[in-house]
Image (cartoon, rainbow, N blue to C red):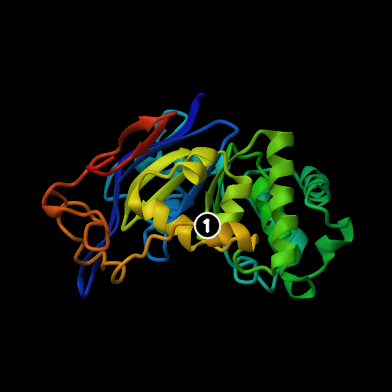
Amino acid sequence: MTALLTLNNVHVHFNTAAGLVRAVNGVSLDLGAGETLGLVGESGCGKSTLGKAIMRLVPVSTGEIRVEGTDIAQLQGSALTAMRRKVQMIFQDPYGSLNPRSTVGRSVAQPLVLAGWKPEAVAERVDTLLGWVGLPTDAKQRYPHEFSGGQRQRIGIARALALNPRLIVCDEPVSALDVSVRAQVINLLEDLKAEFGVSYLFISHDLSVVEHIADRVAVMYLGTIVEIGSRDRIWRQPQHPYTKALLAAAPIADPKLARTRTRTVLQGELPSPLEPPAGCPFHSRCPIAQARCKTERPVLRATGDSAQAACHFI
C-alpha cells in the first residue's frame, strides 16, 4: 500500500496563560491511497487538533506531516495553496461551517473560484457536485438555513470534493446529526470513496460509526497513539488496556452479547495535557500498570497482523 499521508513524531503544543498544552505529543502513523483510517479516543485526546494540523489550520511544533512525500509543515504561499487542493476537510458542525449569507452555490463554488476556474466551468462543476451528494441543482440558489442538518453536511461534502482532493479529513462529520441521517451520510462517503478513490482520515468518538466505515483504526490517548491496526483486529483482538476499555463502553444492540462482554473499568479522569503523566501516559488509569509504567514511556511495537500497540506488557 502506497502511503498518501505520513506523520512522523508530530507534536502540536500551545502556549497558554496556564502553561504549555501538549495537545498532540508525538504521533506517527500513515494512511494509504484509497484507505479510510479511523481515529478514535475520548474528547480532549487531541484528535481534532491533529486533523487541523494536517490541514495546516494550527501550526506543527515539531515533526513531519508528509502528503505524497512532501513535508507540508514547511510549505508557504502558493505551495501551501496547491497542497490544500489535495487535502480538504469536512467539519463537525454543518451549521457553522457554511456562511449563512452566501447561497449554497456560492459556498460550493468558492474553492473553484479561488483556484482560478472560469465562470462557465464553475457553474457546471457546482451542478455536478450537488448531484454527487444527492441534492437538486436548484439548491445552489438557496441559503443554508433552508436545509436540514444532513443536507447541510452534504453541501459541506460537495465543497470538500470540488477540487478532486486525494485526502479528506473528516472531523466528527456525523456527530451533530440524527441517528437516522448519520447512516445516509456515512453511506454517501463510502460511495464517493468507491467512485473516486479518495482517502479519509475519519475522526470520531462514535465507535459504531468507525467500525462501519474504517479500514484501519488508530486509538489516541492524551495526544499519543496507543494502538493501531485493521478494523477487524482492533474489534476482535484489542491489545491495549485503553482500547479494551473503549470497546467495552460502546453500546451493543444485542442484549445477549452485551451480557457476555468483559468490561474494563477505568479509574479517574483523563489527565490534563498541561501536566501529562511521566512514563506511560495511560498508567494513572490503567488496570495492569506497574512501577515501570510510571517512569518509562512505551513505544508502538508490532503485535501481529500489521498491528501495533504501545504497552510494556503486551
Residue in front for this viewpoint, 16 or 209: 209
Position of 108 with respect to 167 (left or right) is right
Q: Is 306 located above or below residue 225 in the figure? A: above
Q: Is 306 located above or below residue 84 in the figure? A: above
Residue in front for this viewpoint, 259 or 51: 259
Position of 149 with respect to 1 (left or right) is right
Disc 1 crowd, CA 10 A, few/some/many (<14, 14-19, 20+)? few
Look at the image and tell me whether residue 107 can be seen: no
Residue drawn at point x = 22 percent, y = 62 percent: 284
Percent position of residue 187, x then y: 73, 49
Residue in front for this viewpoint, 109 or 180: 180
> Would you name the residue on which mark 1 appears?
260
Residue type at mark 1 is Thr
Q: Is 115 located above or below residue 176 in the figure? A: above
Residue in front for this viewpoint, 7 or 131: 7
Percent position of residue 158, x then y: 71, 52
Look at the image and tell me whether residue 149 can be seen: yes
